[in-house]
Image: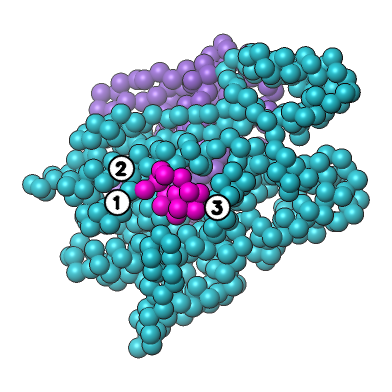
Chain colours: A purple, B cyan
Amino acid sequence: MLQEHARIVDFIATAEGVTGRKKLQKMVYIMKKLNVPFREKYEFHIYGPYSEELTARIEELCDMGFISEALEDKGSYVQYKYAVTEEGMEFRQAVAASIPKNPEAAALLNAKSARFLELASTLLYFDHLEREEQIAKLHSVKGKLNFTETEIEEAYRFLGELAQLKLA
Amino acid sequence: MSYATQKLAEEKVFKDPVHRYIHVRDQVIWDLVNSKEFQRLRRIKQLGTSYLVFHGAEHSRFNHSLGVYEIVRRISDDVFHGRPEWDEGERLTVLCAALLHDLGHGPFSHSFEKVFDVDHEEFTRAILTGDTEVNSILQKVAPDFPADVAEVIAKTYSNKQVVSLISSQIDADRMDYLQRDAYYTGVSYGHFDMERILRVMRPLDDQVVIKSSGMHAVEDYIMSRYQMYWQVYFHPVARSAEVILRKILQRAKELSENGYEFQQPPTHFLAFFDRSFTLADYLALDEGVLMTYFQLWINERDPILADLCERFVNRRLFQYVDFDPGTDYKKLGELSALFKKAGIDPEYYLIDDSTSDLPYDFYRPGEEEERLPIQLLMPNGDIKELSRLSQIVDAISGKRRTDYKLYFPAELLIDGKKKAIKQQILEMLREGGI
């Protein structure tokens, strides 16, 4: 019961907080694609893979008081910072989430920028295609972001590194 | 004449209660409608378990898919035709995408996808690009055409106008299902002036905008959607049936994994239990198949599977109470322990369920929102986001409403066995806490 909520609380606690809605979306997506049992359904949206269900779940967890959402004004834009509250920690203990703990993967993901995670998750979204087609698709749907070859190479290397961790 | 532009000798029409007639002139569309993968949609209800509440809601995804096609056909052939901002070369792509957008839905999609962790959109892509009749029809248009149609449906197609006709906050999919579901359920919500909206839709840059003179029709559409979600789609009794359905599939999977010997083996499900399924396994399923298993499993020796199936088939649904997980999750643990003491497995008979909806949302530059807003085209050519001009829409913009329920079999709690524990459970359920 409430397992799906507990998994998200657990993940944010393991990551020691996440700054940015987009970043959180992409972190969960990448973990899910690496077979961590998140159940949120993803579709392709403006910034790449996006889950309406995850957005809803985060809002619910904020309403329940298990996750805090702080607005950070960055001048030209604002960002939301998510952390697990004390009540959330109690909830985490009471409803033990059936999810493998992956602190290393969470830290690796958290250290990356939202732009980089958008790139990596978009490549993963097209992982049914051959690598060349994947890159062509990336440029087609993310043309405005002008991802460089170096960034793309780094994204593949990063995904390979995560895959080595055997997350699930 | 190429297959892509080939017309039928005579226009075909389908009589339709929502759009009166659905018109087909293109050979490609006619062939797609007659493909076996599209015909399968006749055997999948549009509203899943809602027919157990609204007895008229027996309409299928076949009806809805034709309806979405008809709306897009009218936009493409009447409203956008001849406008320089619209690429006429996209006509067949968008018509096929409209017709086929729900092709990958399975029986009782929502529950099936949850239990077996599958995604109907992936099946849609697999049907369009795999070894199917639909694929062979699309291939005849052009080798890349199946992938193009799949990309429109997956929202990764390069022409965003085409994508937004099929999926955006005001798209042909929603315009059809709101009206169709209102018609078949018999509710008085869900009606809005679609004719007016179609007349004021305009292709512009990489989106579809609405002339500001049509704002009130759009307001009506958004309010219709809001009411349909809470009155029909999230009806707590239909959700009770969904809960039982999920638990049937979960129980069958668990029994199979534990080596239980079924009297009626779950042949059609085995590949989903161990995730070895193919597209052919998926296409072999429909709601008739599932209901047949449920009927037969009523006589299984496993009391839980038999009971859940009997409940679903004969509409003996679970009762429910409101539940606030933020404060009640600890009590839920206590309740779960009491269910075990009473000899009732809480995994199958005490189920929390939440549902939520965001009626409309908009994107403010700089924020990390993901929904494309509805844009109004002002008489001077400016573009303004809908909620900036509409007070009604502004009042509900960005406001998510969530409903939590706790489902349980009331009659199992009032039978004679372990009375004291059951009394304690009932008090907890009745007296608030939960």
Q: For residue A12, which quarter of the picture?
A: top right
* Residues marked 3 and 1, same chain: yes
**Image mark for residue B56:** 3
Name the element at disc 3.
Answer: loop
Residue type, label 1: Asp
Q: Nearer the viewer, residue B387 or B89?
A: B387
Instruction: Identify the magenta region.
Output: B177-191
The image position of residue B10, as x and y in percent, is: 38, 85
**Image mark for residue B193:** 1
- For the point 89% across and 23% down, the residue is B417
| Mark earlier in primary sequence (3, 1) | 3
The image position of residue A80, as x and y in percent, is: 40, 24
Residue type, label 2: Asp
Q: Mark 3 and 1 residues: CB-CB less than 8 Å, in contact?
A: no
The image position of residue B175, as x and y in percent, is: 38, 52
Q: Mark 1 and 2 residues: CB-CB less than 8 Å, in contact?
A: yes
- For the point 60% across and 66% down, the residue is B40
Q: Is residue B214 covered in magenta? A: no
| Mark earlier in primary sequence (2, 3) | 3
Residue type, label 3: Gly
Name the residue beneath numbered marker 2: B220
- Disc 2 versus disc 3: distance between alpha carbons? 24 Å
The nearer-to-camera label among 3 and 1 is 3
Q: Chain of mark 3?
A: B
- For the point 50% across and 73% down, the residue is B33
Q: Is residue B180 covered in magenta? A: yes
| Mark earlier in primary sequence (1, 2) | 1
